[in-house]
Image (cartoon, grey):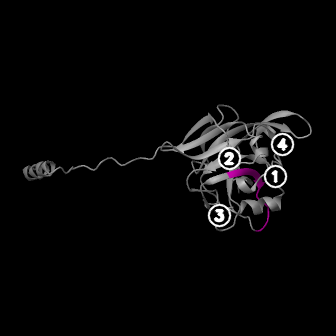
Amino acid sequence: MRSFTLIAVALTACGMLLTSPPLAVAQSAKLAVATDKPPDEVAEPIRAALDGKVLRISADDKPFFEFWLRKDLPLAQKPEGGQLDIGTIPEGTILGVLKVNEPRRDFRNEEILPGVYTLRFGVQPEDGNHLGVAPTRTFALLIPAKSDPKLEPIEHKDLMKAAAKINAVKHPSNLNLQSAPEQSGQFPRLAELNDGQHKAILLQFPAHLEGAGEKTTLTFALVYEGTGQI
């Protein structure tokens, strides 16, 4: 014991620490809502449809995702229980805009490079090429904002092609959309789904039925981190 004490004193005298400094621990993601304009890359017809607020998801106090969402979402059919289903939103509809501030991964684990993207509603086809285990067939597809100037929905074939410009494998870049665990509480907010496999932002949109003028709300979860086979 005396020998160990003498060594410790000697090391301390030399300015050497006997204990390692504490490791930096990454902070949990945080959500902040602010008033801000969308990026300049967003076309005017789409800018006019956004609600003027930005939703920032940050880690270690650095925003990695920034969302601008539609102020009123057009629906094809009334949402049962206020929840999203395949036929609720016309495919190709603009959901909002996303600014990516650092390289991230989409739901298929493909890279999303920093940039500004429109988010359009997409449905995974039921065919032999899509036999994975995604919890839903509903997605937000990412399209470079500079190449997406119109507010109107895009047809399925053109939508898939436009969203396949981002990653090296030429697969539509996507974030999975799932049912929200509940309709009440504060929106937007962050949550973990499927036993913590997926981290999501819970969203509640003012919405209306196209042609009917009926007002309603639509609630769903957008998975910003976590993957699945699609």
Sequence-earlier tag: 4 or 1: 4
Taking depth in this image into account, of 81 and 221 the one nearest to the observer is 221
Distance, label 3 to label 2, CA atoms, is 23 Å
Distance, label 1 to label 2, CA atoms, is 25 Å
Magenta-span inclusion, residue 118 = yes
**Circle 4 residue:** 75
Residue stretch rendered in magenta on the structure = 117-128
- Which residue reaches farthest top? 185
Location of the C terminus (image quadrant): bottom right
**Circle 3 residue:** 167
Residue 102 circle label: none
Taking depth in this image into account, of 37 and 227 the one nearest to the observer is 37
Magenta-span inclusion, residue 53 = no
Residue 40 circle label: 2
Taking depth in this image into account, of 77 and 207 the one nearest to the observer is 207
**Circle 1 residue:** 91
The amino acid marked with disc number 3 is Asn
The amino acid marked with disc number 4 is Leu
Sequence-earlier tag: 4 or 2: 2
